[in-house]
Amino acid sequence: MLHTSRVLLRSALLTLVFIAPAAQAKDPRTDQRAEQDGVPVTELRAFAEVLERVRGAYVKEVDEKELIQAAIRGMLMELDPHSAYLTPDQFEDLQSTTSGEFGGLGLEVTMEDGFVKVVAPIDDSPASRAGIQAGDLILKIDDTFTKGIGLADAVELMRGEAGTKVTLSVLSEGDEKPRPVTLERDRIQVESVKSETLEPGYGYLRVSQFQSRTGQDAKAALEQLIAKGDLKGLVLDLRNNPGGVLGGAVEVADLFLDGGLVVYTQGRDPASRNDYEASAGDLLDGLPLVVLVNGGSASASEIVAGALQDQGRAVVVGTRTFGKGSVQTVLPISGDSALKLTTARYYTPDGRSIQADGIHPDIPIQVASVELYQERGPRESDLPHHLINQDGEDPDAEGGEEPLASRDYPLSQALSILKGINLAERRGRNDGAGRANTDTASQ
């Protein structure tokens, strides 16, 4: 595939050089044969003529190599928002991003209607600390308007050495005009996996991005939660996870599945289908699982949520996901450059394409800011001469950390759903055991 891409590119450039002189006599039979072979000779001649006219008549001298690179970028921009031409520096940046460390603002972005749109801010990055949210539009980067400049160029403008500053013009949903946000670039070291215990018996696993090591890190974190003992269920948090490496997503989904299809990709050729299967062995051994998603959950995170939803392994809660259902392949080309090219769509185990649709949660939970109301009426403890609780604890004592509902309402709801599933399953087992005992006694 790579060899073919290089040959096609070289052939196209050689053709351009050969046909550039407009005054040369042309054999129409040659053009007819080329058209029959699928080569758009007329369009290639038009491109060569435009290139020659720009070189000769533009108001100032231009670099021919830069013109050709700009033409390549324009060609790829017309395909879809995710295909791009990568210069050597941009190719190196992409490799750094998938390894989990780079210099920049901590934003995952895409293109929408010619503008740069935030898919998700990376956890604990300059962007997230400045309050930039999924769905925000970036209209300007310093003095450069983003309309029509291309995604790779916009990313390059935002990247830079740690300690340097950049000002973004940010338009949020509902705002009438953009606001300036000045950010100081930092060394972004993405810890793609974090874990903690929300309440005794209920674990929390946060995956913020899918990198080459995410599957291994998620397994290690999950094993630590299990080792603490008495694990009753888990919340898998994929909010604002913009995606990343496909293999990392498959490995994470595999942790919770006991075999079966995780995802399949399908390119233009019917024979190009690739199936990605889970191996035997669910690390949680069937314990209740809730997956938390939102509009910033994209691509690889949608693969995980879709696989667990289709296989009936988890309850997906939150808001509808971003809807990026395509696969990009990075194809190195000569000169240390590369093409990031959309080569396939991916499908959930049930054959759903989520392209421009997203994963719809089983239980919708809207993002909300909650102010807890402390209900306080007369209680037994207020009555004179009341009996003291034998445990010796004051049930009205205040203090402790901030309630989960006030600092992260969707997570608190996900935890409540998880506890409800666990309670329902436990009562179902107890009811079944009780019926079995009754039946035995009646015989």
Image (tube, rainbow, N blue to C red):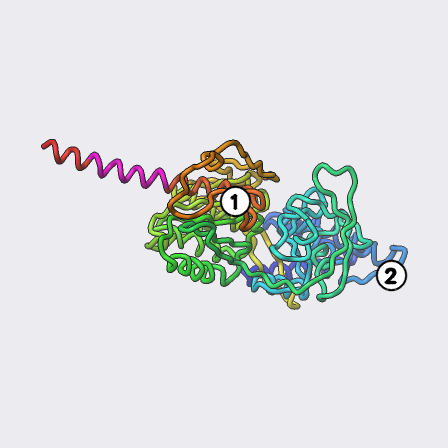
Quadrant housing residue 51: bottom right
User: Which image quadrant: the C terminus?
Assistant: top left
Instruction: Name above or below for residue 107 compared with residue 314.
Output: below
- Residue 271 seen from this side: no
Q: Is residue 428 above or below residue 209?
A: above
Q: Position of residue 18 (x, y in %)?
A: 72, 60
Res. 421 in view: yes
Q: Label 2, on which residue?
A: 61
Marks 2 and 1, the one that precedes in the sequence: 2
Residues in magenta, as a range: 423-435
Could you tell me residue 269's position as x and y percent?
Answer: 49, 48
Judge whether residue 274 is colored magenta: no
- Give the number of the mark in front: 2 or 1: 1
Left-right relation of 317 to 20: left
Out of 305 and 163, give the one closest to the viewer: 163
* Residue at point 45%, 49% (across, down): 199
Q: Amino acid at mark 2?
A: Glu
Q: Position of residue 286 (x, y in %)?
A: 34, 48
